[in-house]
Image (cartoon, rainbow, N blue to C red):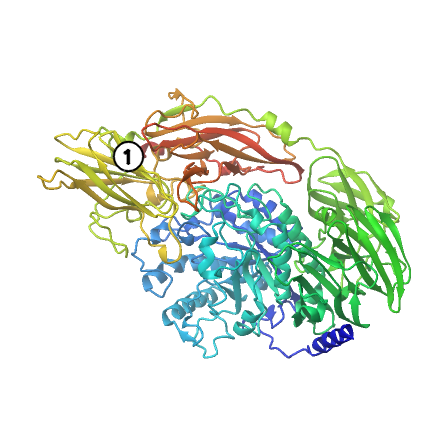
Amino acid sequence: MKLFRDLLLAGLLLATVTAQQWPLHNDGLNDVVQWDHYSLMVNGERLFFWSGEFHYWRIPVPELWQDIMEKIKAAGFNAFSIYVHWGFHSAAHDELDFESGAHNFTRIFDMAKELGLYMLVRPGPYINAETTGGGFPGWLLTGDYGTLRNNDTRYTEAWTPYWSAMSKMVAEHSVTNGGNVLLYQIENEYGEQWTNVSARTPNETAIAYMELLEASTRQNMVNIPTSFNNPNLGSKAWSLDYDINHVGGDVDLYTLDNYPSCWSCNLAECTSTNGFPPDFTTFDYYTNFQEAAPTQPSILGEFQGGSYNPWGGPQGGCISTTGPDWVNVFYRNNIGNKIAGQNIYMLFGGTNWGGLPFPLVGTSYDYSAPVAESRLLTDKYSETKLLSYFVRAAKDLTKVERAGNGTTTFTGNPDVFAQALRNVDTGSHFYVTKHTNTTLMSYLTFKLNMTTSVGQLQVPQYAPNIVLNGRQAKILVADFAAGIERLIYSTAEILTVSVQDNKPIIVFWVPTGESGEFYLKGAKHGSVARCDGCANVAFHPANEGLIVSFMQNRGMTVLTFDSGVKAVILDRSAAYAFWQPTISANPNVALNETILVKGPYLVRTAMIDNGTITLTGDYNGTTELEIFAPLGMETAGWSGGGYSHPSWGGPDSRKVMFNGQAVAVRGTRYGSLIGSLSAPNATVATVQASIPALTNWKVADGLPERMVSYNDSGPGWKPANKPSTLNPWQPETFPVLYADEYGFHTQTILWRGRFTGPATGVYLNVIGGVASGWSAWLNGVFLGSTLGNVSLSETNATLSFGNATTVAGENVLLIIQDHMGHDETSGVLNPRGILNATLLSSPSTSNPTFSSWHVAGQAGGERNLDPIRGPLNEGGLHAERLGWHLPGFDDSAWESGSPEQGLSEAGAKFYRTELPLDLPGDVDASLAFELQAPEGAEVRAQVYVNGYMFGMTPPILSFETAELTRWTAGKFIPYIGHQIEFPVFPGILDYQGNNTIGLSVWAQNAGGGSVSVSVKVLGVYQSSLHPGEGTEYLRPGWSSERLLYY
């Protein structure tokens, strides 16, 4: 009786969901892109916006952007998002570079069109992104342009040229002009519309700022929807729905950012936003969207794809925090919350090369993302793909209402929670099931009460109960459209559907060893055509078709039915190796524009032409290849159109090409083709063996500026003599010793102060961002250092001159400081430099004062001497200013010396060597530099590869203790960091030539220090990519102009 009541209650609840009439919106300029309560629509077709983020400026090899975008497409996404980094493109006021090297990113728009991916473009002007100054250019951060992110005319004048250039670029490539840019984001996480959100009290300054950006956008011919990403669940900013009083500043589309398990490996950074939820707690987004934007689709403008690893974080990051099980539960929970779009931040993180990072992070921006910093695919990528393919196949997801949620009503098990969605037109249902308490890892079984076209059913009817094994969620369907066919229900998750020859191939997947059951409408008979890991397969006649129950161990099973439908059943391991490439460039691809491929590490692209199936992709080892593709003529079908192929006369007459090589294939009795990809030309072991050790190092003094005799009167130095600054953080002593005031905005800064008189010491307070360090010398004698602290942005010390000799005439104090990048949000104007420089003397004499200061930073300052590598690549080290890190510099007069031998005293040395490489051209290899230092080493090291600073390692501090531990890299600071492996992209490295390797070692204590460097192969795959081909232009060499900056 109780079961009947539950089923009746569930049926009544779902029956109450009716199609409310919601308004259809557009941007007022055209109806190419429209939207309503349910979804986006492009040219009248509904779209579930499924996007992943990558940053072209974190992979500064344009030839590799195709690699990342193909991996995004291969994982089933229909869109991707990019931040545009103003500071990367602007070395100086009124200067913009969209032409040099990776600064010219227009090819991304073309590749998006060719591959079939929509774009969300996010140009800021402020982007956050864990990058220096949140993407603001350094010249903006002096205070001369006001406090920023407001309607101050000085700030408006600064951003207008950049914003105009970006808007014009986007307008040219928008979907309304034949391109693929779908959405244009205004500002970033600027949830400042209300001074009181619940009372809707307007913030007039913020509103005026947003309206200025929006007006410029439209004046520059952008006629696609504008969007905004709210920083948290509480801000409810810039939504036309929430702004009932029309105070202004609203964008077309409200979106929401959320990082339920923290954007950082240091969870303490997120408590102000997330509170203190237990690990693995899912959030409610449905309520927020219904309150803030009920007439708009519920889109997560950023949703957690991983976490950045701060200084002192765990080596390798915290991927276990947001691993495959996290992806499984949290992304499905989003769908249960009626999400109509999601942008995963990050899908590929990349590298914080040069001066890109903000102070809390090091060189790696791996982000524990599905595609690793090394460009290798992870299990997280494969798990994400399982849901991506489902979203692509589930066309009915684009017009759903929530049809209830709960425990016993749906499952009869109080420990299992179900969220039900119903398509208001077709009646199809989606049941998102998860643990009621998602923090638990218990093993649960249950039956599900479903509303179907044949009535209320409790399923499964024949198979064992549905299982949630640990941290797991499942989306189960009723009345699911598979082309023109229909599944009345399934207790196994659907991976995807491919319609071939007007009949669907329905692909199911289950965790290894689990059972499932599905009810196929219209079928009368079925048979097992392939059993690889199957067990207990049974066919049960039913009124409307056939019910199939099964268990699947490791492998793939194929079932065929008299209706022409095929079912492929995979366990998780087989599903990870299963691909659905598209054969059209339509981002919202029809299911009859896809094929199915099993086996390779990666399938990038597919094409069918004149009886030949052409695939590109990657593999390692001998790999079985199985392809499901149309047999003959495919005509217009359920999707309203399709691709027509010449009749091939049967599977054995078809041809297959993989990476340009013919693959011998045979047909199977269930219509697929099976062949084998031969052993690759190279492996990790053979490539590693071909890479020589880094020897034959040359060495030179890297810090001659510490000596009294050093001449700082040349163009490499600027007098630091400003008596005042508009920066709101005023210095404690004068002149102003802020590097930005003198045109130096990134990385190492050198200060030389002169004085006369009987000083006995100096008090210094230096600000360089958290984890920054500095060292000081008087007249060439080492005084001391501060090593850095992950919780302190400024560090101070009183240094005695007792071990140094002051002279009767002029004395020179040198301070070398590490600039860790500019802070973000409200801290962007925090200075970098010396807050206080006070000479000390004995009580009987008055304190002497500095007579002058000089400062050195990047060669040429804002002149951007190296436009290919750009304004953030290098700082003010002696070696950098003179170009010792660049290919072509003549070091023949240098002495031999190894960084493993290192320094015997405090100071800096610069090492150079060559790395010859000769890797096979048809192999994609991922290489990394590995840096090690002796335990407790107090060194800061930076690695340069063909002129690019691709590794900085400071000493290592744990964020849990803020005490001395071990290391990090890129900037390699063993006593602060965590990273010892520094992946370097092909194109930066020349895989078929000589490579210039530079290493700066700055020893911060009197005992000196040393570093060892080696090259490690992370992965090798036979590939269609040809990495590094045509990238010579990215590695310009040394020129004699550098000699001016001594």
| Residue drawn at point x = 45 percent, y = 77 percent | 246
Image x and y of residue 644, in percent: 79, 56
How many marks on residues?
1
Q: Residue furthest left?
A: 844
Left or right for 742, reference 56: left
| Residue drawn at point x = 84 percent, y = 59 percent | 548
Q: Quadrant of the N terminus?
A: bottom right
Looking at the rendered structure, the kind of residue marked 1 is Gly
Position of 51 relative to 289 (above/below): above
Q: Is residue 109 visible?
A: yes
Position of 144 relative to 932 (above/below): below
Image x and y of residue 133, in percent: 39, 52
Q: Quadrant of the C terminus?
A: top left
Q: Is residue 585 visible?
A: no
Image x and y of residue 1012, in percent: 46, 28
Left or right for 842, reference 887: left
Q: Which residue is mark 1?
A: 784
Callout 1 environment at 10 Å: few (<14), some (14 to 19), or many (20+)? Answer: some
Q: Nearer the viewer, residue 46 or 573?
A: 573
Image x and y of residue 223, in percent: 53, 66
Position of 804 relative to 444 (above/below): above
Q: Nearer the viewer, residue 661 or 540?
A: 540
| Residue drawn at point x = 44 percent, y = 71 percent | 249
Q: Residue furthest front?
A: 1
Q: State the SS at label 1.
A: strand
In which quarter of the view is residue 34 placed?
bottom right
Q: Nearer the viewer, residue 1037 or 630?
A: 630
| Residue drawn at point x = 48 percent, y = 32 percent | 931
Left or right for 1014, reference 421: left
In which quarter of the view is residue 6 placed?
bottom right
